[in-house]
Image (spheres, helix red, strand yellow):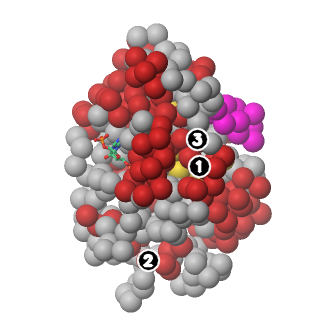
Amino acid sequence: MPQIDTGQLLARDRVDPSLVPQRTLSTGAVMPAIGLGTFGSDHVSPDEVADAVVAAAKFGYRHFDCASVYGNEEQIGRALAEVMRAGVKREELWINSKLWNDKHGEDDVAASCEKSLADLQLDYLDLYLVHWPFPNFHPPGCDVSARSNDARPYIHANYMKTWRSMEKLVDRGLVHHIGTSNMTIPKLKLVLEDATIKPAVNEMELHPHFQQPELFQFVRANGIQPIGYSPLGSPHRPERDRTPEDTSPTEDAVILRIAQHHHVHPAVVCLKWAVQRGHTPIPFSTNKRNILSNLLGVAFDPLTAEEMREIQAIDRNCRLIKGQVFLWKEGQTWEDLWDVNGNITPP
Ligand SMILES: NC(=O)c1ccc[n+]([C@@H]2O[C@H](COP(=O)([O-])OP(=O)(O)OC[C@H]3O[C@@H](n4cnc5c(N)ncnc54)[C@H](OP(=O)(O)O)[C@@H]3O)[C@@H](O)[C@H]2O)c1
């Protein structure tokens, strides 16, 4: 990452995609080490998100993190078509989508992927993820007490049936890579034993107040690239994902001091840290200045080794996206979703 003077940086209105750090996956494919998130958190409209995609592509983003449950793939599809009409080639883009929890049935996986492809106006996805390891879903805009009527725990045999259907999508050429999301080490160990096509990526919450060092090391040791969601601590996340204990990485005194030193917003420090640490953050934004400064931030003016160490030391193990709506029986706490004792939580 080149050092560059702040004045020079502010004058830039885009980043050449060749200057954006990249990750090499186990297949040898190369993925930009920062993507644009597209979850409007139940309050940003699909059209606003689509406009952000067009703006981001102009600034030099090539990686977009989509999902059917975000309810905006059709609008993003139109945005991507515009981006390609403007001259960006399909093979220069890296597009993710995700299988939603109500589509884990063997027959539903292909239909769901085909729907995302049609909405996104693409022939293939670079990456298709199983969004959550549970088939439990919730309606958009629900509150924290919402539960699926037939909510179930993680059942490995069922997950593997879903995974086999994911593997078939690779065989059909509809998706180039498949991956997991919101997994834990014990669940991933089972999947790694049984998968024919190993997950290329695991998408997980990662920010300076939730560094997940064990899972981060585990996935990397197993040739899986970590993609970090809510890399800024998701300041505008839905109400259902807030508790009084939550902390905010962008308000941390250490992050504020480093931000001042680099003349950037604290959000940008979180992204520099993420990329230099070795994961791939996917910050959401519809603010064009923020979209650009986030990309500039990871392409230039790196943190020092000492700053990286200081940020490592502010981990608070503070999970923000706790996932309560995916619990499967009465009387549980959200920790049951995350196998915090090192074993899969029994049914
Ligand atoms: N796999 C999963 O289960 C999962 C779960 C959650 C999220 N995700 C993915 O991860 C993406 C990102 O996570 P997130 O949306 O929860 O939160 P986030 O990226 O941590 O935070 C996004 C918020 O930060 C603000 N922001 C962005 N850049 C900024 C800057 N430079 N300065 C100040 N504020 C800035 C944005 O507001 P402005 O628009 O005003 O800039 C936006 O509201 C999602 O969009 C989605 O694609 C995946």
Please provide percent x and percent y for residue 100.
Answer: 43, 54
Q: Which mark is residue 303?
A: 3
Quarter of image, res 233: bottom left
* Disc with the residue nearer the chain's start (2 vs 3): 3
- Disc 3 marks a residue whose amino acid type is Leu
- Disc 3: residue Cβ within 8 A of ligand 1's nearest atom: no
Q: SS of the residue at dot 2? A: helix
The answer to whether residue 293 shows anywhere in this view is: yes
Cα distance between the residues tagged 3 and 1: 6 Å
Residue 66 part of the magenta-drawn span: no
| Segment tinted magenta in the rendering | 22-31
* Disc with the residue nearer the chain's start (1 vs 2): 1
Please determine whether, in this image, residue 10 is positioned above or below residue 259: above
- Disc 1 marks a residue whose amino acid type is Glu
CB within 8 Å, label 2 to label 3 = no
Please provide percent x and percent y for residue 104.
Answer: 50, 59
Residue identifier under label 2:
334
CB within 8 Å, label 1 to label 2 = no
CB within 8 Å, label 3 to label 1 = yes
Please provide percent x and percent y for residue 231.
Answer: 46, 50
Q: Would residue 341 appear left or right of 28 to someone viewing this image?
A: left
Q: Which mark is residue 307?
A: 1
